[in-house]
Image (cartoon, rainbow, N blue to C red):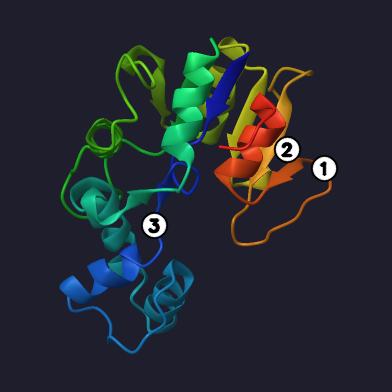
Amino acid sequence: MRIGVDFDNTIADYEGVFHAAALERGLIDAALPTDKNAVRDFLNGSGRKDDFTELQGYVYGSRMELARPYEGVSEFVARARAAGHDVFVVSHKTRHPLLGPKYDMHESACAFLRDCNLAGDAAVPESQIFFEETKEQKISRAAALAVDAFIDDLPEILAMPGLPAACRRILFAPTGLSDERFEVCRSWDEVSVRLLGAAL
C-alpha cells in the first residue's frame, strides 16, 4: 500500500504554538485563549492582519520546535514501514512567508521531521517527502505517486479532483470534525486500525 500523509495539523500538532509565539512577539495578552483561531481572530479583528501573516511565517519558518508530532504518528509510520508499505509526506505551503523574513518553510518542516525521527531510512525516506507550493500541486503529486490512501485534516483537500479514483480519503480530525464523504479518524490509533488492521 502507498500511503500519503499531509504535514500541518496531521503530522505536526500546533496546539498552543501560535499563542506562545504571539506572546514572544508581544502581539497578545496571555489571557487570550491558546488556540490558533483565537489568536488569528484577535489580530485580524484589531486591524493587525499583517501581524498574523508574519506570525505564521515566524512559526513555520523559525519556531517549529514549539510544535510536536501528534501522538501515535511515529508509531504508525514505523508499523507501516515494517509491514512493507510506502509512506509519503505530501503537503503544501509556500517556500517563503508572504510577509516578514524569508525563512525557508520547506526546509524548516523537513528539519522538524528529521528532529522527530520521522524522516530517514527507518521512517519516511527524504526522497519521499514533498512540499508543494499550491493545493493543486499537492494533489498532482499525490496522484503521480499513485497513493492508495491519503490522510489530511482538510476536507477541501480530500474533496479536490485529481486523487486516484480508488484512493481512500481519510480525514484526520482530532478536534471532532465530521464529514460523511470521508473515512474520519480522531487519532493515529484509529488510522492504524483502518489502514493496518490493528491499534498501535
In this rendering, which labeled residue sits more in front, label 1 or label 2? 1
| Crowd band around label 3 with a 10 angstrom C-alpha radius: few (<14), some (14–19), many (20+) | many
Instruction: Give the percent coordinates (x, y) of residue 2.
Output: 59, 15
Q: Quadrant of residue 194?
A: top right
**Cα gap from disc 2 to disc 3, whole angstroms:** 24 Å
User: Does 85 appear above or below 24?
Assistant: above
Instruction: Give the percent coordinates (x, y) of residue 121.
Output: 31, 14
Q: Which residue is mark 3?
A: 14
| Residue 76 in view (yes/no) | yes
- Do callouts 1 and 2 mark residues in contact (Cβ within 8 Å)? yes
Quick one: label 1 or label 3, which is nearer the N terminus? 3
Q: Which residue is mark 2?
A: 159
Quick one: label 1 or label 2, which is nearer the N terminus? 2
Give the residue type that dot 2 points to: Ala
Q: Quadrant of the N terminus?
A: top right
**Residue at 37%, 85% in the rendered image:** 32
Q: Quadrant of residue 89?
A: top left
